[in-house]
Amino acid sequence: MSRARARTRTQVRRLTPPRLSPRDVLHVGSAGLRARPMRVFLSALGIAIGIATMIAVVGISSSSQAELLRELDRLGTNMLVAKPGEGMFTGQDTRLPKDAPGMISRIAGVESVGTTGDVAESVRRSENIPKGETGGIVLKAAKDDLLGTLRARMASGTWLNAATGRFPSVVLGDVSARRLGITEPGQQVFIGGRYFTVIGILEPVPLAPEIERSALIGWDAAEQLLGFNGHPTAVYERSADDRVAAVRTLIPRTANPQTPSAVQVSDPSAALQAKAATEGAFSTLLLGLGGIALLVGGVGVANTMIISVLERRHEIGLRRSLGGTKGQIRIQFVTESLLLSGLGGLAGIALGGAATAVYARAGDLPWVVPLWAVTGGFASTLVIGTLAGLYPAVRAARLSPTLALAAG
Amino acid sequence: MTRAHLTTHPTTLPATHPATGPTARPDTVVELTGVTKEYPGGVAALRGVDLTVTAGELLAIVGPSGSGKSTLLHIVGTLDRPTAGGVRIAGYDIAALSDRSLSALRSRHVGFVFQSFHLVPGISARANVAEGLLYSGLSRAERLRRAAEALERVGLGDRMDHRPHELSGGQKQRVAIARAVAGAPDLLLADEPTGALDTASGESVMELLRELNRDGATIAVITHDQEIAASLPRQVRIRDGEIVADRSPAGVAS
């Protein structure tokens, strides 16, 4: 008796089912998919749409942000603008002194200075247009290295120089040019009773939107031809990056020693930085939509798997009779579900990446799809695949091998 | 065939050395004692069945539908457990084995042939036969090699790459038989193997089973067909869950 029992026990130990190799697991897990490609396509499509939406939402906002950051990088964050502020008492002279630009340029660390001064004249297409129709265009006298300090670029024509700055020549901001209907240099605009020749048009100047809506003439021409008072209304300066804070505290006293409180100093790049930050915060609503699509896709996969188990009772029975364990049946169906959703995930990543590429190409943005979005998206499809496949797989494994074979 | 031996040469046993080792091919392949199977609701499919099958036998388990022969097939094939009674298959006491171990036992010791073949559509005959060895622990290359061997043995050496839909019914059943014998099981269970075939193909399938038996395979054919049963050396007649006759050429009846 005891000998018999001992024999049985050793035999029990020997009857351990061998493990399936990973390759074999992949083989049995994909067998069902290979047999029904159309169904695979449709149920993977649900997952793909969800992932594509999420990748595209993240990708598009990241691309926009990358563009802003690239722009910010080009424009630099080391520029400050000094403008006349509000005086504390009415009637107080808050104008910047005429020598303010020179003083600011002598602050340690300041690398370049550009100055504009508002001129009270309207800019019109011709003398026939009423004087009141300014089109919101401000005439400014420009001096020093305004173009360089703003890192602005000419869309066409040339910038003012010592010679043209003396004559009735004008450079238009891009908004001004559009409002005036000026498309190329050489045309003329009517300013203060005489025609000025447009010698250049600027590209947009993100750090100084007020320049975009202005017409710029030479300092000398403004004083001689239009009676400009010579007081600057904006002094733009660029300094070394590590001196920005120090320069900022020095500007008011330097620019207007009599009334430092009447000088307003601002950092135009701050607004751009804030914009970049909000661009990065992609639309939660769209992301939520993608999540719902993903969830619906997951339900689709679960549904497909349940139908697959019902249809393949014979196969399950056959595999059990061939020696497949419950665990091996389970892993087969979980693998199938994982493959199904994983395929959907990969297709979704490709689709979302392509959508981002189209958007980036159309908007001339850099193509950015963050790695965390790709890995996160793919990982979530694997989680969904596991969850969707678990219940059908457990059902499949629980099927009695005899029923599975006898059915239908 | 010791454990150490098995792990050193997992691919050469037991097919090529069926008679070596201390526990090689037990003389008694099937040993049922007082096997009863009752289903919930008091329906008894088997009532106290005693059945012994020794190695090398070719027998028919014959009975009308509803006689309990399918239940008997499931229990002998370890797909189901009896409500009462003892079952030893290939020397193993079924009651002492877990579901996992039973699966392992099936993969090594029992081969099934079904009436409706149960081939996987869309893959070749060779892949179908190799699929039968998937749970044996053999490498993929070895499975394919043995599949080719088994197909040669059933006379389908020239149909290896044909898919099931390109084969006749008789050929499909030969593929299924190849799948069942590829792992060199101790027991081959054929459930109505000719049930879906015309007379000629059915006869050739039976001839194949006889051939395999001559080469040493132990085969039990479950059938309702008296003629087929009569053509086999031993007939176990079952009716209403009981064995009513057990005839063999030697005239030994139990």
Image (spheres, coloured by chain):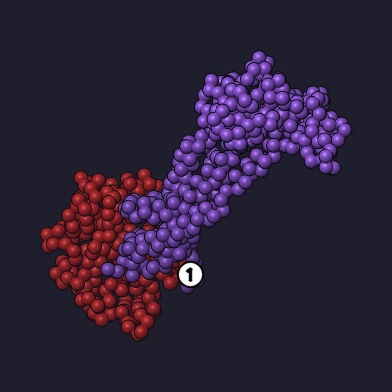
Chain colours: A purple, B red
- Up/down of A242 relative to A4, above or below: above
Q: Residue at x 29, y 52 (%)?
A: B128
Residue B184 appears anywhere in the view: yes
Q: Callout 1: few (<14), some (14-19), or many (20+) C-alpha neighbours within 10 Å?
A: few
Q: Residue at x 43, y 49 (%)?
A: A343
The residue beneath circle 1 is: A5
Q: Position of residue B158 (x, y in %)?
A: 20, 45
Q: Position of residue A81 (x, y in %)?
A: 73, 33
Say whether residue A367 is left or right of residue A238.
Answer: left
Q: Secondary structure at mark 1?
A: helix
Classify the position of the C terminus of chain A by image quarter.
bottom left
Front-lying residue, A161 or B106: A161
Q: Residue at x 37, y 82 (%)?
A: B40
Q: Position of residue B210 (x, y in %)?
A: 20, 59
Chain at numbered mark 1: A
Q: Residue at x 13, y 62 (%)?
A: B198
The type of residue carrying mark 1 is Arg
Front-lying residue, A353 or B28: A353
Front-lying residue, A311 or B37: A311
